[in-house]
Image (cartoon, coloured by chain):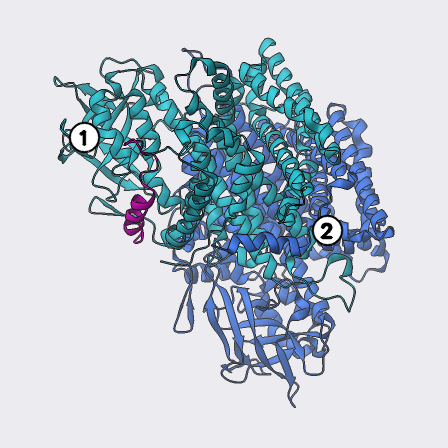
Chain colours: A cyan, B blue
Amino acid sequence: MGRNIYKSDLREFKFLIEDQFYQTKALFEHSLYSEHSAENLSDLLQKAKKFACEVLGPGYQEADEQGCQLVDGKVQLPASFPEMWSRFKEEWGDLASTDGEQHSELPPFIMQMLLEMFMGANPSFMTYGGFCLPSSTLVEKYGSEIQKFLFKEKLARSEWTSCLCLTEPQAGSDVSLVDTKASRQEDGTYLLTGEKYLISAGMHDLTENTLYFVMGRGEKSGSGTYGLSCFIVPKYWVEEDGSLGEFNQVECLSLADKMGFKGCANTHLSFGKNGPCRAYLLGDRENVGLLQFLTLMNQARISTGVYALGMASSAYYNALAYASKRLQGKRFHESFSATASRVNIVEHVDVQRMLLEMKSKVEGCRALIAKLTLSESFLKTFEGQADKKAEATHHQGLVNLLTPVVKAYVSDQAWRVCELAIQTCGGQGYLKELGIEQYARDVKVLAIWEGTNYIQSQDLIRDKLGLGNSSKLFQIYKNEIEAFIAKAADYPTFKGEFKGLQESFEHLEIVLKAVHVWVRTKEMFKIPAYSTRILHMMGDITLAWLLLEAACSASNRLSQGEADTDFFESKILSAKFFIRNELPRTRMVMEIIQDPDSFCSVDSSVWNSLLNEVESL
Amino acid sequence: MGRNIYKSDLREFKFLIEDQFYQTKALFEHSLYSEHSAENLSDLLQKAKKFACEVLGPGYQEADEQGCQLVDGKVQLPASFPEMWSRFKEEWGDLASTDGEQHSELPPFIMQMLLEMFMGANPSFMTYGGFCLPSSTLVEKYGSEIQKFLFKEKLARSEWTSCLCLTEPQAGSDVSLVDTKASRQEDGTYLLTGEKYLISAGMHDLTENTLYFVMGRGEKSGSGTYGLSCFIVPKYWVEEDGSLGEFNQVECLSLADKMGFKGCANTHLSFGKNGPCRAYLLGDRENVGLLQFLTLMNQARISTGVYALGMASSAYYNALAYASKRLQGKRFHESFSATASRVNIVEHVDVQRMLLEMKSKVEGCRALIAKLTLSESFLKTFEGQADKKAEATHHQGLVNLLTPVVKAYVSDQAWRVCELAIQTCGGQGYLKELGIEQYARDVKVLAIWEGTNYIQSQDLIRDKLGLGNSSKLFQIYKNEIEAFIAKAADYPTFKGEFKGLQESFEHLEIVLKAVHVWVRTKEMFKIPAYSTRILHMMGDITLAWLLLEAACSASNRLSQGEADTDFFESKILSAKFFIRNELPRTRMVMEIIQDPDSFCSVDSSVWNSLLNEVESL
């Protein structure tokens, strides 16, 4: 085990809970979460930080150096993972379990904070148990009684792990091409044959069993996405009484060697290649696999944002720590003065620019994820309550709308934050020893997996924003942001920032109208030229909103003569920096979209002709 | 040896030589370059591409896997390097040699094209011989007669290599802190003691000798940069008759493990640690080391841009090749159509957006470097000609002004191009096998070494643009760009693009005026908050200008009914895409700089207070 480089600031979480999202107080009055209090949350977060820094973090760089090896069909994980797993399972494995009367669930809003620290401290390690909780929820929601009995608690307590199997070599982002085949047996189980590709954490011996949630196609099912079904394939068969049967012919054919995330075994799996591979059909219903998977996929998308945030945040703090101690050069305006003293690079204004960009993006992305998970937390308390239907619609709408933004915007910004963190540390930033370069390598995959960021932008523009046609989800978002902007009069010192936010939101509305015009004028083909930028625009606006909200909360604290003024003042700085230096992109994007000549399309014959010469010698 | 992944298009070079920079014709009429003709250049470029793809390229990924090892004080390079070196030396080692009557020099404009392919195909390898040519020029310019006799031709023919030693552990970017000590001996040579850090290609056995150009301080020299002198330290001492003497006590203490560029040994060197280390003083003049080094450093900065271009260009072509063959999904506007066919991802408009951003940036950066090296090429022909003084001033001004832009803008854009190339290839982009991820890892250091990109922006704003006070260099740039814009009437189809360029140039002028106001109002401390963005602004404008110039040349070709219309039309697309989608940043940056609230500065006490909590457990 090595040196821990993971860094976090618990005040960030405390601020979200007690200040910016003070509504959480109402949350803890609900019976679902009533066991938790401000004090035990504080203890829990402290304990989680300690675990992240002392147990997970020291294995971060080692996992990168050792990677995973396939030896005689077995996957060897980094040496520290088995011990790490047993400690993880013991201390944190049953957070999701609701078995037993006394146990009070942890709201997603808080869970996200723990996961940010765990995923930031050792992202590869966290992939192994990453789907335990969401797939336990999946079984709870869709599983048959026997499936719930067999699998739910095993997953909820992390006794077994779960693995998501969607991608196949010929079907990367295009799920409709999946052709893993399933044939129904007389006893109601299925026999599976097929291969899955680039499956994260697909094979290991950390737990006695692994449940593969495999997207496949029944014999009578049609092609396309509507013929897909979700199968539960245990690595070792599970009899109906819960006892373990024989090895179920799930094999790892090869491991992919990749840029980062090296402790996470990226597997090429075969099902039923050398013998029968049996499977349960989730909920005994064929052809609804994609629908069932949706919850899981949405959860995976949110988790992707949390991974990105965890690493970007630690990269930022590492860069800050380095900049605070590295003596180098004189201040720019004193550079010709013989008597001027050398300063730590944190005093160089260009370094501050980089630190402030990192700080504001990290804090803004944290608030964005908190916003989403707070809605998730409320949603859980509304279950089965008819009088909460309007509120439930509101919160579900926010969750649906923000999920692709969290996935794509946070992962793209994390890459940028890592770039800046490396740059801040100069030559040291490029060296393995400091560890920041690993964050950049680990973070890059997040823009690709669980649906590429372009797919997220399609989901956002087409399915969530109704191709600009003032969708219900957009109305929910608009109501919230306008309610916030209405508070501007209470904060006269932030007048310019509120104005900037309002203008940017208007830019978004103009852009969405332009998108909708294209639908009517049969120019829909233009939309994907801008969809990534529109998603980023929405991310920028949401960050500006939430950072300004944080600044308002912080200014309230400061006016109460609160201690820790540096922390609260730095919140105001984050908002100011972001709104004045980053948010102006929205006007630029709007103007680009309004310029008809910004659309360029190239025939594939032209690309081919360019390639011909490239590939000749 | 492995598979070559390096890709390039010779038409790009042909286009620069014959179309966009048709002035090169005049160049080849000068006696200095008269041996070269269009035909032999074409053969030369063809031969260089073959060498890049067949000799250098196959060792690219292997060099990354094997890296360098320090074993018993010796540095082991990747296994393929020694054989590669002997072929490189044989075929390309003497391009710079002007020994003998018959040999005609290759202009930097063409040399840059060869280097782009070599550096793109195997950047680590190219670091070993990278300083041969510039340090041969250095010796020619500043060396004493005996130094010229001993070293010049050895370097020019790549028989010995050269290594630049500036950085020390305590003095990263701050050269004034260098404290390697030199004491003068009775025979006029010096004894050196000191350590140098993060020295690229600092130790190897590819050649029988290596000359270290070491920045050090004589015993009577003062502190600061004006007390620095340049010493030539041969790894094996060189007697005055040219024979090799004994080992000269240059040792490698350790190698740095880093994100990329792994085939380049990053060494921590000691001089005179275990015995006397002798040195020649360059030109027998103390205290002028930094001045002497300037040429070398400027050359290294230009080379940094060429490395960045070479890798970014190949990353783009690799992404294009992948996108052209990867069948995946339906077109966005047909996504709900059951009968629509699947297409190669090159047909997805979001993929085209990424390809066009890569294409326009790569082509624009290539034209930027060509612009600079064309001026260098002309400068050489003016040497000693009194009647060419005005022209020489013009071209020297352009070279000086564009050098920091080439170093910083091209390296920053290369990182962005690599990000897009990975993203275009999805999961495959993240895998080592495809090789694109290595380009991203290799490229990142280019924004750091040879003066961080922030240092480049200081150089640009303070020393080249005179802090906004309408410097002579800026006037030269302005005259050129205005002369180009004056041609707008000849190209009515590009009316909007010319207008965009003109407006962006006005934004730059407004920004520079604002910078100069800060100097007068004693707000110079604000400048570094924006200097990186101003450098990028100037890069964006220069790219827009040169891409539009290329589009004009291409449109002339098309109107002549030239074959290969796809290629020429794609040049127009690059200009159009960049000017409509990237250039609008200049307005945004101008508005940010005009907003007094965009400047944020944070006391180091605040940063420290933020850190305290982060580092507590």
As drawn, is A229 to the left or to the right of A246?
right
Farthest bottom residue in view:
B186
* Residue B398 as seen in the image, left or right of residue A542: right
Residue A275 to residue A285: above or below: below
| Viewer-proximal residue among B184 and A295 | A295
Of residues A242 and B188, the one nearer the viewer is A242
- Determine which of the numbered discs, if any, sits on residue A235 in the image: none
Residue A38 within the segment the image draws in magenta: no
In percent of the image, x 40 and y 20: which residue is there?
A383
Location of residue B429 in the rendering, given as x and y in whole percent from the top left corner: 44, 38
Q: Does residue A178 lie above or below A61 as drawn?
A: above
Disc 1 is placed on an element classified as loop
Label 1: which residue?
A272
Three-letter code, disc 2: Pro
The boundaries of the magenta stretch are A78-102
Apparent side of residue A54 relative to residue A507 in the rendered image (left or right): left
Q: CA distance from mark 2 to mark 1?
A: 62 Å
The residue labelled by disc 2 is B528
